[in-house]
Each structure stands twice: as structure tokens, then as C-alpha cells.
Amino acid sequence: MENKKIIIAIDGYSACGKSTTAKAVAASIGYSYIDSGAMYRAVALYFLDNYIKITDPKAVSKSLEDIEISFRFNEKNGASETYLNGINVEDQIRTMRVTQKVSEVAALKAVRDKLGEQQQKMGKKKAIVMDGRDIGTHIFPYAELKVFMEADINIRAYRRQQELLNRDKVVDLDEILENLKKRDHIDTHRKDNPLTKAEDAIVLNTTDRTIEEQVSFVIDLWKQKST
Ligand code: C5P
């Protein structure tokens, strides 16, 4: 019997392994993967490049009209990449310049409304894995499977440092640690759709788990929920 198509919502703190897990799960079960954080990062990049002040609501709403975000599959590396107004920004959105700014941008209601609407459209046909901060609580409150990821903050900082090193970026561990704490704070304290565990989400603590273990944890849950 064919598995029922469902929505898998993966939320949690920064650098707990959400994207890595979500991407691998989606590839393994033939679902689409959407990195909602990449969309917030693309908006933050646009604001930085165009000197948009987040304290100026008119400038914010005008620029949101001018922003078009999409994902395209790169055949060469087998990855889905983020495009901002038709330009591949996958590398630029991962720089510390954007990472330092993104949570303030993501706290703006106008930004969340625009991206939230686009994310909900992407989930219309189900068979999707989406990761973020408010996917199970706000974007897809009826998602059949919700996972909430957490991990020790020092491990998270170390893993993020390794990930940046793989992209040839050397960043001090203390800088990463400070950034993670700041983003956790903004994400959990903002007024609109703050990061919080949905009541029906299953906690996945990745401190002592390998990526393979995290992925099979979610796939096992998917098997239960989709049959
Ligand atoms: O997942 P990632 O770390 O790339 O997300 C970047 C930032 O975007 C987060 O720190 C958070 O502030 C914001 N975000 C959000 N809601 C989402 C996804 C990301 O507020 N659904």
C-alpha cells in the first residue's frame, strides 16, 4: 500500500541540525524540502544590500513588494538553492553579515505575513518537509508530523563552526556562540509567532545523536504517521 502524503514540520533552535535532517529525510522518502530560514535570510540580504531600515514600515512594505524568493534544484550538487529576484544567493545568505541581521528582520510582522503566505502555498499538495521556527505552531498547525529539535548550545556552536569551515569560512567559536544566544532570544521572545514547541510536537534532542540517527528517528515517525 502506498504511503499517505503528509506534512512534516521541523522546528527548533538555530544550529540543531534541522536543515541537515529535513533535507536527508525529504530525499529519502521522495518529499520536497523547504528551508524557511533561507527565505528569511534572503529578505535580510535584500534589506542589507538596499539599506532598508527595519524601523521604517513604509520602506519595509515597499521592498517586500519588490522581493521574489524561489528555490531551484541544482543538478550538479543535488541541492535546492535559494534565489532572490532571479539571482542565486545561496552562499551570500549563509554569511555572518546576514546571520547577524536575520532574526531582527524575521521579527517584523510584515515580513512574516508575506513569507508565511508563500510557505502555506508550498504545502498545499503535502509531501513536504519544511523546517523553521513556527512551522508546526503557525504555518501548518495541522501537520501530521511535528518534530521539535534541540541540542546543547556548545555542541550547536561547534557544529555551526564546522559547517562554515566546510564553506571555507573561518569564524571564531565565541562569535558563533554569541550569535546563537542572540537569535534564540529574539526568536523565542518576538511578538508574532515566536519559537515554541507545538503541544503535539515530538522532541528530538541531537546533542548525542549522529546525523544518521536523527534522520532515522524522523523517518520512523513518518512511517507511523503515513500508514
Ligand atoms: O534556520 P535558519 O537559522 O537559517 O533561520 C535564520 C533565521 O530566520 C532564524 O534565526 C530566525 O530568526 C528566522 N526564522 C524564523 N522563522 C522561520 C525560519 C527562520 O523566524 N520559520
Image: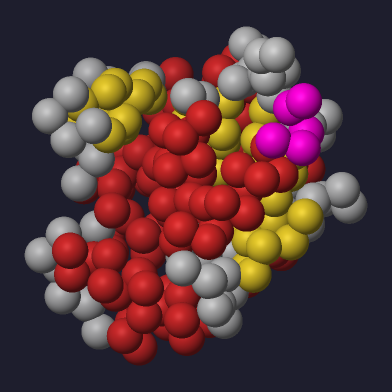
Residues in magenta, as a range: 223-227
What residue sits 18% from the left and 69% below the top? 165
Colour scheme: secondary structure
**Visible residue check, residue 58:** no
What residue sits 68% from the left and 19% below the top? 3
Residue closest to the far right: 199
Q: How many marks?
A: 0
Quadrant of the frame with the C terminus: top right
Report x, y in % for residue 150.
Answer: 63, 68
Magenta span contains residue 130: no
Magenta span contains residue 225: yes
Q: Is residue 117 left or right of residue 144?
A: left
Residue closest to the far front: 1
Q: Is residue 101 left or right of residue 138?
A: left
Report x, y in % for residue 45.
Answer: 31, 44
What residue sits 27% from the left and 23% below the top? 73
**Prevailing secondary structure class for the magenta stretch in the rendered image:** helix
* Vertical order, 44 against 213 (above or below): above
Quadrant of the frame with the N terminus: top right
**Visible residue check, residue 188:** yes
Report x, y in % for residue 202.
Answer: 77, 55
Q: Picture quarter containing residue 223?
A: top right
Report x, y in % for residue 83.
Answer: 28, 27
* Vertical order, 150 against 103 (above or below): below
* Vertical order, 34 against 30 (above or below): below
Q: Is residue 214 left or right of residue 52?
A: right
What residue sits 74% from the left and 61% below the top? 203
* Vertical order, 108 against 225 (above or below): below
